[in-house]
Image: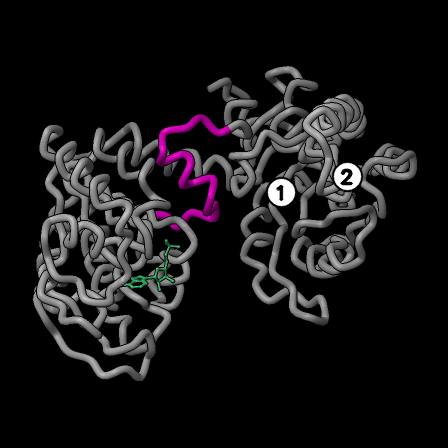
């Protein structure tokens, strides 16, 4: 497989798919540029080799072309500043002007294309379908956009000599620029960027090259959103720590009193099935033993500590208790591979951060002792950032949905398009 490190970009134009889908405030100022910074090593390598990156991304969910609110023009100056070159801008990613600008790029120059999703062809999904469109109309519209997508892919590919995918955040989408375009380049001329390589390696380490014991910490609000992940993990892990809101569905299923805690009553049977599967697979399920309960869902609620299965009516568990912190920490600290997805409590409320923080500290300790720790999925990333421990774990994934699908055991189109699987 081709690698970015080996590839000599000198004199070459590289179509680089990045994930610059950054949050903007109402004045279109970037509020968090992590995703742009994450792609810099790849872009800088291309530039320093004497190549010309043609940078392509989506931003938000535009529904028309153009849509000023979602223009990548808003981030152009910041990208230029971070890269240290005056990046040119193509105000339409797939017209003749863009092709001309790409063709005119000199060695060491960079071009940013306008938002790929201004074209329905990027996602390959029809737009402007009437709400009452018939099934036939939907099928015809789908076919039409898929046909146009082929031309769109060819057009984008025609700008460049090689293709670099550095957008892990969209690797679970089979879109024009994230997967389909790879077919236009031979194996020697397509590769992952550095960020993508790191993400793929991290996933590989927790899903395939596992050092044992392997502990997964699953938190967050609901079990229903994590069923496939848990099922897949039950075939791989030694310990599964169940934390956060999903705790109560398991506790109730086991006959405990969960008061007003978040609970999915229609998932009680499923919870029992998962526990049964764990037993059969020899997986040690670690559930909370005590909780910090509150008399309302609020930071200022009255609080108390109780056993996890004795929560009175009118009270709800919003964080794990001190006994549970110890139990979790003991398991985590003996682990050699750790995957952490989802907070242990409502960590957004200052009075209920303690449990999630203690989980984070245990993960940091285990990492110091040589464990490989991967933290990923929206809220757990926010948690490690909040606690200032992002650089004390082995890897913090940038890809929410993509990471979760990889953990579910699915093949990601953006990765398969380059690696073949
Ligand atoms: P998820 O998106 O499923 O990973 O869930 C993350 C959310 O779960 C966070 O916003 C937490 O506040 C929430 N959460 C964690 N523990 C609890 C709990 N005990 N009760 C209600 N919500 C919770």
Residue 236 placement, left or right of 307: right
Q: Position of residue 73 (x, y in %)?
A: 78, 56
Question: Residue placed at 31% from the left, 67% from the top?
Answer: 346
Query: Which is in the foreground here, disc 2 or disc 1?
Result: 2
Upstream in sequence: badge 2 or badge 1: 1
Front-most of residues 30 and 411: 411
> Tag 2's secondary structure?
loop
Q: Which residues are magenta?
A: 395-412
Q: Position of residue 400 (x, y in %)?
A: 46, 47
Residue 211 placement, left or right of 175: left
Q: Say if disc 1 is inside 8 Å of ligand 1.
A: no
Question: Residue placed at 17% from the left, 71% from the top?
Answer: 313
409 part of magenta stretch: yes
Q: Which residue is mark 1?
A: 18
Figure quadrant of residue 125: top right
Question: Could you classify mark 2 by the number of other residues whose Cα lies within 10 Å: few (under 14), some (14-19), or many (20 or more)?
Answer: many
> Tag 1's secondary structure?
loop
Q: Which residue is mark 2?
A: 119
**Whether residue 361 is visible:** yes
Front-most of residues 74 and 45: 74
Question: Residue placed at 77% from the left, 39% from the top?
Answer: 119
């Amino acid at each position: 497989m081709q690698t970015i490190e080996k590839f000599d970009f000198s004199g070459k134009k590289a179509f680089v798919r990045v994930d610059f889908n950054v949050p903007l405030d109402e004045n279109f100022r970037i509020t968090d540029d992590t995703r742009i910074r994450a792609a810099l090593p790849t872009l800088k390598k291309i530039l320093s080799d004497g190549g010309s990156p043609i940078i392509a991304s989506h931003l938000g969910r535009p529904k028309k072309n153009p849509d000023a609110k979602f223009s990548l023009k808003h981030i152009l100056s910041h990208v230029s500043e971070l890269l240290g070159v005056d990046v040119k801008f193509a105000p339409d990613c797939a017209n003749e002007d863009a092709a001309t600008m790409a063709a005119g790029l000199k060695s060491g120059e960079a071009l940013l294309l306008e938002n790929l999703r201004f074209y329905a062809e990027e996602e390959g999904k029809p737009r402007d379908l009437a709400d009452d469109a018939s099934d036939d109309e939907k099928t015809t519209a789908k076919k039409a956009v898929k046909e146009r997508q082929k031309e769109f892919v060819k057009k984008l590919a025609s700008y460049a000599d090689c293709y670099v995918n550095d957008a892990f955040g969209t690797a679970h989408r089979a879109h024009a620029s994230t997967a389909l375009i790879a077919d236009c380049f031979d194996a020697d001329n397509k590769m992952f960027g550095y960020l993508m390589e790191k993400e793929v390696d991290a996933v590989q380490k927790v899903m395939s090259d596992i050092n044992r014991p392997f502990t997964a910490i699953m938190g967050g609000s609901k079990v229903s959103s994590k069923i496939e992940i848990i099922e897949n993990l039950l075939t791989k892990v030694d310990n599964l720590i169940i934390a956060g809101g999903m705790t109560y569905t398991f506790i109730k299923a086991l006959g405990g009193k969960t008061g007003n805690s978040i609970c999915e009553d229609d998932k009680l049977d499923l919870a029992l099935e998962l526990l049964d599967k764990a037993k059969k697979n020899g997986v040690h399920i670690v559930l909370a033993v005590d909780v910090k309960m509150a008399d309302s869902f609020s930071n200022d609620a009255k609080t108390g500590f109780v056993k996890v299965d004795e929560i009175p009516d009118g009270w709800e568990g919003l964080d794990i208790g001190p006994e549970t912190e110890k139990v979790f920490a003991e398991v985590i600290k003996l682990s050699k591979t750790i995957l952490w997805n989802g907070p242990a409590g409502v960590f957004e409320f200052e009075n209920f951060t303690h449990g999630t923080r203690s989980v984070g500290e245990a993960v940091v300790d285990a990492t110091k002792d040589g464990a490989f720790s991967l933290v990923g999925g929206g809220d757990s990333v926010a948690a490690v950032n909040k606690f200032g421990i992002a650089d004390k774990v082995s890897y913090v994934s940038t890809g929410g949905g993509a990471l979760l699908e990889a953990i579910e055991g699915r093949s990601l189109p953006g990765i398969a398009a380059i690696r073949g699987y």
